[in-house]
Image (spheres, rainbow, N blue to C red):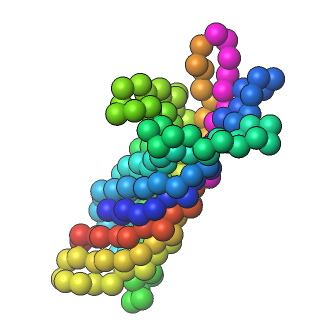
Amino acid sequence: MSVGPNFASINSEVPGYYDLTFKGTGAQFDVKIGGAVKENLILHATLTSSAMSGPKITSDGISEKTSNDISLGEAMFGAGLTYYIMPSNFFLSGSVGLGNFTLIEGNNANSISTDRGFSMQLKIGKEWWVSKRWGLGIAMTYGTTNLTNSPGGGMEERMSSDNVRILFNATLN
């Protein structure tokens, strides 16, 4: 399990109509559940979720910060592998799956979710043993989601993200 800050950029484009970029910071949550397929190699299911509140929106070179009651979230569900380099306990991890974006206004009063598309996460980190079964550590991740959304009216919206995160890890073995 990992938590930490998220530094995100999400692009939304409908060719011929608009090209928007949302940038901001927020929080990231990451859970991996699985088991060892051989020594130091873990196969796992991956769930990631991140959100940025009050993102800055840029279109045609004009930028404006939105209010903090508007947030843009990104989620992924997939599978991955993690490899531990021993005895240093550094690790490399990669996950792929389906991801989507959700725009929320207010206290979930109005929310819009996109169709799902390709999503991935790459992660590198280091853990230290704090007990016989628990490791605590720090990691850096890069994540992206790319999809084509069909909001209706015959339009196709292309959306993509680039996220860099610094996460604090807790691992139970």
Dominant SS type (magenta): strand
Q: Nearer the viewer, residue 69 or 41?
A: 69
**In the figure, 50 relative to 99: above or below?**
below
Q: Which residues are magenta?
A: 153-162
Image position, residue 91 (x, y; %): 45, 75
Q: Nearer the viewer, residue 10 or 149?
A: 10
103 with respect to 40 (left or right): right
Placement of the N terminus among the 4 image quadrants = bottom left
Q: Is residue 169 magenta?
A: no
Image position, residue 130 (x, y; %): 23, 84
Residue at the spot x=43%, y=80% of the render?
126
Image position, residue 69 (x, y; %): 44, 38
Image position, residue 41 (x, y; %): 40, 70
Tell me, yes or no, if residue 91 can be seen here. no
Q: Quadrant of residue 158?
A: top right
Q: Determine the residue located farthest toward the bottom in the rendered image.
A: 87
Q: Is residue 155 magenta?
A: yes
Q: Nearer the viewer, residue 59 or 172?
A: 59
161 with respect to 94 (left or right): right
Residue at the spot x=52%, y=29% of the render?
114
Placement of the C terminus among the 4 image quadrants = bottom left
Tell me, yes or no, if residue 75 can be seen here. yes
**In the figure, 63 relative to 27: above or below?**
above
**In the figure, 95 relative to 146: above or below?**
below
Residue at the spot x=43%, y=67% of the render?
167
Residue at the spot x=36%, y=26% of the render?
109
